[in-house]
Image (spheres, rainbow, N blue to C red):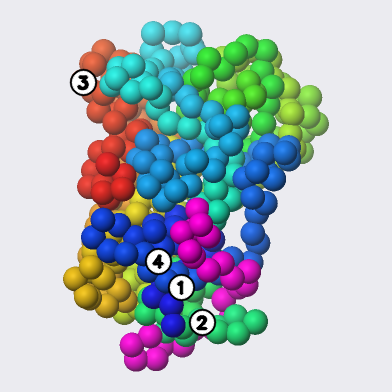
């Protein structure tokens, strides 16, 4: 019997596995198995492949957790792009005006505001760290779940695994969540995200750029290659129009949407798209079951916080479980897991509400309150203390953090 079986080897699941298998200062590592049907190439092999158009923005808190998990050293430095500044503006003002809200890492004596990393590289680095920590990787999917007194049996096409705790980290359509009888409330934003890599005439200056528009939000994220990754969260009808355009026509639309902030653009990858939905599980835990990452919550991508929230879930759950084991408690006990649920539900709810407010007021708002929010962006620029507050939020170093994120 394993101590823990994790269903899903994405960033959240692989991170939880690596932290639990490594242990902490108060407890030795646990025996952990992880089910993942689609294992990515190792970071070394992936570094020789063309870059993935899908990227994530990792916060300082996530960086610290990844270092503690043993994964950071496996990320190829040449494919990790630190960004030092962030520029945010509404379409009602020019991109070169004083009304643009600008954050700089130097304002809080930090070397950068975070890192842009390819999804596949991040997952591969965490899975490698998990294996190095002694974790058992099973290339399989969940087929059944059965509770048996002091344990739970996880079935796969190739056999079954028993554990004292099973963790659902298998995404928004979580099979583990459904098998355990947990539910989730979902709603569509009526938007679609378009992601791609683009070459730009002007340098990105190690800066992230974000423009709020009446029909969506556009982010340009700096890559180590000198190119930029775009995440264009557009209303459904506009997104379909954009996806139907030729590469040249799409680039022209992108130039207009970005207000030419990086000069003329040219697509250097295929365009990928996916519908945007939000999800919230009313309960994250049952006796012997815990949900993390997208299996528990999905937020709008405009703030780039989805993966960071999942990594902090992983760190918080690992801390709760390892602390319990250090005092001879059962890692799957409901009392232990409820502590994780209370902790992370409140943090995620606050972040999700903030993100939805930004989308509702800055990207789509038209009433007096929205106009106040849109005009308020430059006000933040005038207060160094308020700017530092927002920078700390972007770094992920505020709120109740797990020890591994401090």
Q: How crowded is mark 4: few (under 14 residues within 10 Å), some or many (20 or more)?
A: many
Q: Could you say which is closer to the camera, residue 364 or residue 211?
A: 211
The span from disc 1 to disc 4 (Cα, nearest Å) is 12 Å
Q: Is mark 3 on a helix, strand or loop?
A: helix
User: Is there a contact, CB below 8 Å, between mark 3 and mark 4?
Assistant: no
Looking at the image, residue 97 lies above or below residue 313: above
Residue highlighted by disc 1:
5
Q: Quickly name the residue at label 4.
A: 291
Query: Mark 3 or mark 2, which is nearer to you?
Result: 2
> Decide: marks 1, 4 in contact (CB < 8 A)?
no
Measured as percent of width and height from the top left, residue 65 is found at 37, 46
Query: Do the CB atoms of the residues marked 2 and 1 lie less than 8 Å apart?
Result: yes
The stretch of residues the image draws in magenta is 129-151
Identified at 41% across, 39% down, the residue is 63
Q: Is mark 4 on a helix, strand or loop?
A: strand
Q: Which of marks 3 and 2 is nearer the N terminus?
A: 2
Which residue is at a point 40% across and 24% down the rendered structure image?
112
Distance (Cα) linking label 1 and label 3: 45 Å
Q: Position of residue 55 (x, y in %)?
A: 57, 39
Residue extending farthest to the bottom is 149
Residue 161: give its label: 2
- Earlier in the chain: of badge 3 and badge 4, it is 4
Tell me which residue sits at (33%, 16%) in the image. Answer: 106
Task: Quote the CA–CA distance across marks 3 and 2.
Answer: 52 Å
Quarter occupied by the C terminus: top left
Q: Name the residue under label 3.
A: 385
* For discs 1 and 4, the disc positioned in front in the rendered view: 1
């Amino acid at each position: 019997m394993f101590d823990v079986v994790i269903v899903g080897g994405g960033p959240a699941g692989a991170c939880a596995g690596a932290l639990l298998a490594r242990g902490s200062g108060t407890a030795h590592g646990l025996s952990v198995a992880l089910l993942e049907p689609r294992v990515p190439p190792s970071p070394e092999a992936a570094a020789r492949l063309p870059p993935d158009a899908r990227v994530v923005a990792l916060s300082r808190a996530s960086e610290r957790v990844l270092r503690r998990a043993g994964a950071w050293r496996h990320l190829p430095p040449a494919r990790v792009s630190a960004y030092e500044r962030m520029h945010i503006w509404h379409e009602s003002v020019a991109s070169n005006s004083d009304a643009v809200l600008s954050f700089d890492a130097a304002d809080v004596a930090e070397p950068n505001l975070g890192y842009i990393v390819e999804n596949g590289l991040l997952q591969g680095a965490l899975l490698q760290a998990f294996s190095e920590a002694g974790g058992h990787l099973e290339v399989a999917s969940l087929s059944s779940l059965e509770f048996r007194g002091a344990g739970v049996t996880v079935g796969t096409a190739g056999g079954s695994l028993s554990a004292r705790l099973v963790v659902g980290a298998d995404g928004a359509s979580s099979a583990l969540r459904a098998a355990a009888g947990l539910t989730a409330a979902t709603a569509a934003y009526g938007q679609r995200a378009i992601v791609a890599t683009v070459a730009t005439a002007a340098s990105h200056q190690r800066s992230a750029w974000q423009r709020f528009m009446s029909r969506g939000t556009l982010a340009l994220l700096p890559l180590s290659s000198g190119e930029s990754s775009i995440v264009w969260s557009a209303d459904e009808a506009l997104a379909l129009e954009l996806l139907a355009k030729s590469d040249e026509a799409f680039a022209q639309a992108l130039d207009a949407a970005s207000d030419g902030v990086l000069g003329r653009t040219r697509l250097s990858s295929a365009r990928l798209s996916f519908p945007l939905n939000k999800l919230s599980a009313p309960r994250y835990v049952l006796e012997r079951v815990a949900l993390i990452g997208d299996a528990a919550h999905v937020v709008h991508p405009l703030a780039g916080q989805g993966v960071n929230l999942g990594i902090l879930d992983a760190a918080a759950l690992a801390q709760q479980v390892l602390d319990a084991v250090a005092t001879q408690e059962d890692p799957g006990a409901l009392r232990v897991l409820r502590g994780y649920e209370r902790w992370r539900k409140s943090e995620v709810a606050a972040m999700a509400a903030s993100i939805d407010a930004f989308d509702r007021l800055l990207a789509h708002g038209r009433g007096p309150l929205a106009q106040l929010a849109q005009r308020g962006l430059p006000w933040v620029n005038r207060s160094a203390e308020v700017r530092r507050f927002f920078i700390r939020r972007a770094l992920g170093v505020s709120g109740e953090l797990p020890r591994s994120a401090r």
